[in-house]
Image (cartoon, rainbow, N blue to C red):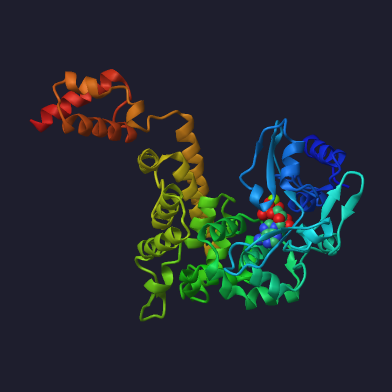
Amino acid sequence: MICLPAHAARAIARLEHAGYETWAVGGCVRDGLMGRMPHDWDLCSAARPEQMKSVFADERVLDVGLRHGTLTVLTDDGPLEITTFRADGGYSDGRHPDSVRFVGSIEDDLARRDFTIGAMAWHPQRGLCDPYGGLDDLQDGILRAVGEPDARFREDALRILRGVRFAAQLGFTVEPQTAAAMRRQQALLSRIAAERVREELTGMLCGRFVQRALRDYADVLFAVLPELCPMYGCAQQNPHHLYDVWEHSLYTVGQVPAEPVLRWAALLHDCGKPCCKTVDASAVGHFYGHPAAGCALAEQLLRRLRFSNEQAAHILFLVEQHDRPLGENDKLLRRQLAKMGETRFRWLLSLKKGDAVGQGTHPAYIAELCETEARLNAVLEEDACLSLKQLAVDGRDMMTLGLRGPAVGEMLQALLEAVLDRQTANTRQALLELAKTRMEELK
Ligand code: ATP
Ligand code: MG
């Protein structure tokens, strides 16, 4: 039993009243049956695009998807996508359906969908439409391709990544024939648009069961991220590490909060290790310079996947900094906080904690990082001055003292550092005095 929200139930009722069979379909039915709150409600209908438009003529709609049969109705409770029952034509380029063909029945529409758990429809009066055994698979925690798996993955290889993503999000097991086909067809992933790959990987990385999914489908991941393949089985030969580079990275991913930037940084933080590995005379492994090498590799990978400049910069920052000391004492903590800002500081702290847990040998270090976090919270609570904007003096004050040009900014920066280091209070009088003293010294 699924409880449809009012806006979806109303849209179904309007279309059916006009004579067009209409159902809720796909992810919302799956989530509803699992007792989860669906993040969007998709409907599918016997109404052709123009017929849907006339039924919703009095509502605000978006019709950019109309060629593929989708009308978006902008209700007060959010957008609602309604798609005409359709079957996809072939995928000769492995990317886009060559054509879209409208079909007559809900069963025909469900046949084009990739996994049985997403190939169910729900109607408030008629109940569940489940021609492929999706409910049984949902109850058994199984991901199974609809129809012949190799053919389905050949039509659209992105489905291979969707399979791993669902495994990572739901913790489901991929049915053996489906899993074998995913592996057989994984080379086709090279034809998939970078943006689609990136979105699936991000969803996968943020899944609750990501560690297991990536362990089971490492080869599928390497088909889209070949740069990471050398991490697999790369022994660390180091008393600080319990796991090889790949396993260690999986632990780290699983440990950090499910935030895209952090999960990507956790996956990539040690990708520079394999190419930096050296083994000393006592057979101990070292990885000097791996953060910088990792940054170079990661940058190439992130650019290929068309990450935004902002996200790429955050991820690269974390990869580059993950091995450096952070907030070891209050003075350093305030300086680093002022430089990188709270968000990056907290991300870095989370990554370092995940990294330490993933090493499996550092309980004392983890306790230290927790203590750094407590000190960070204390610094933030005392409302400390951390930026030029928060200083009790500004550029005009420096000019009144006689400074000009770059000397103004340099003096303000020096004053901020003195405040951060607790050499002076952040009051106007104290800072003006200090500035005068510094000017005297510079004469
Ligand atoms: P979620 O929204 O939680 O990521 P979802 O299953 O709803 O998962 P969507 O991408 O929203 O996934 O797609 C909605 C439905 O459309 C799916 O449940 C599935 O039935 C179908 N679908 C989506 N993408 C594909 C695809 N590449 N191949 C076949 N069917 C697909
Ligand atoms: Mg969805």
> x and y percent of residue 176 in the render?
74, 75
In the image, what residue occupies the spot 85% across and 64% down? 133
Place of residue 89 in the rendered image (x, y in percent of width and height, measured from the top left): 68, 65
Which residue occupies 25% across, 30% down?
412
Quadrant that contains the C terminus: top left
Q: Could one spot residue 157 in this view of the protein?
A: yes
**Residue drawn 60% across the image and 70% down it:** 92
Single out the residue that lies furthest toward the left. 443
In the image, ligand 1 is in what quadrant? bottom right
For residue 171, side relative to residue 286 (left or right): right
Q: In this view of the protein, can residue 179 be seen by the observer?
A: no
Q: Quadrant of residue 250?
A: bottom right
Q: Residue furthest right?
A: 125
Answer left or right for 246 relative to 279.
Answer: right
Res. 303 image quadrant? bottom left
Q: Say whether residue 420 is left or right of residue 95.
A: left
Task: Name the one closer to the observer, 91 or 57.
Answer: 57
State how many labels appear.
0
Q: Is residue 441 above or below residue 165?
A: above
Observer-nearest residue: 13 or 328?
13
Q: Point out residue 163 in the picture as x, y percentages from the top left corner.
A: 67, 64
Q: Tell me: residue 288, above or below residue 45.
A: below
Residue 183: image location, x then y, percent: 64, 76
